Image (tube, rainbow, N blue to C red):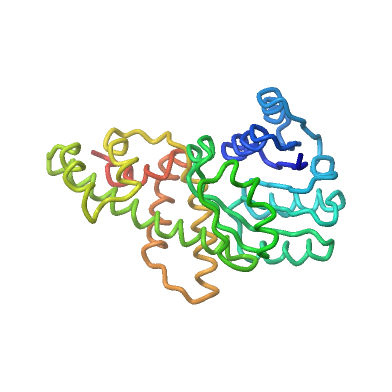
Amino acid sequence: MTKTAFLGLGVMGFPMAGHLAAKGYDVTVYNRTTAKADQWAKKYKGVQAETPIEAVKDADLVFACLGDDPDVAAVVDAALDGLKAGAVFVDHTTASPSLARQLHAALAQKNVGFVDAPVSGGQAGAENGKLSVMCGGDEKDVETARPAMEAYAARIVHIGPAGHGQLCKSVNQICIAGVLQGLSEGVHFAAKAGIDIDRVLEAISGGAAQSWQMENRAKTMAADEFDFGFAVDWMRKDLRIALAEARENGARLPVTALVDQFYGDVQAMGGGRQDTSSLIRRLDDGD
């Protein structure tokens, strides 16, 4: 039985670690808020650790799903002396490509592999074991971790060297931002025009306008319902990373930059914890 550790039990990490346990992996978890680790250990009959270094002791595979660069850096630093040679550390956090490259180099000095492996699919994808994982790092490390990641992922793609998983996640978020703005404007326009949104969606969802966001969020947007997982606060963090990288590599992201500002408006309206489809609120505000 492969010994694993999972660091971070948020809305994504909690079910992801649960899938590992359900597949028979020996899982030790760590979470900064111990109550969440207690809850996980009771639900999955697993083991919890009080510190990252305790959690990773003797682990062959270490997974993390945290908040942002400082969280990842702090946890890796706290776990560093407990990582055994030959282990692979897989970071599912959406963080910066530069941090991924730094950690890859630092852990290589201890003969520990590092894979930056952000995910897409949201809370529902994590709970249903249907996430998409985009990986950066050495191929041998990705392949070592792949069987375990298959416990909660429907698609795992090795993009390239360290940092390329995070770069791919930026592409993902750039695409989503533009789609959601267009969908927001379409749903808003339909409401203003007084046409039946259900019939509109029936008519256009089979054509070129179709998207996952349209299939899963258009009706709830029209109903003013925005409690479906991935929050505006996290989207802004992801777009911040994408825009910072664009400044470095010279990419032009005018729509992404504009939508990032629009999400700032949603935050100012108190919608930071609402899901990303709440982008429509800034159009409907005052109606």
Above or below 99: residue 55: above
Above or below 37: residue 187: below
- Pinpoint residue 195: horizontal percent, then vertical percent: 12, 40
- Horizontal side of residue 30 vs 180, given as left or right: right
Residue closest to the eye, 175 or 74: 175
Residue closest to the eye, 120 or 234: 120
**Image point (45%, 56%), residue name:** 173
Q: Which quarter of the rendering shows the C terminus?
A: top left
- Pinpoint residue 61: horizontal percent, then vertical percent: 74, 48
Quadrant assignment, res 215: top left
Q: Which quarter of the rendering shows the N terminus?
A: top right
- Pinpoint residue 152: horizontal percent, then vertical percent: 57, 42
**Image point (76%, 42%), residue name:** 2
- Horizontal side of residue 281 vs 157, given as left or right: left
- Pinpoint residue 269: horizontal percent, then vertical percent: 40, 41
Above or below 104: residue 73: above
**Image point (42%, 34%), residue name:** 227
**Residue sticking out furthest to the top:** 42
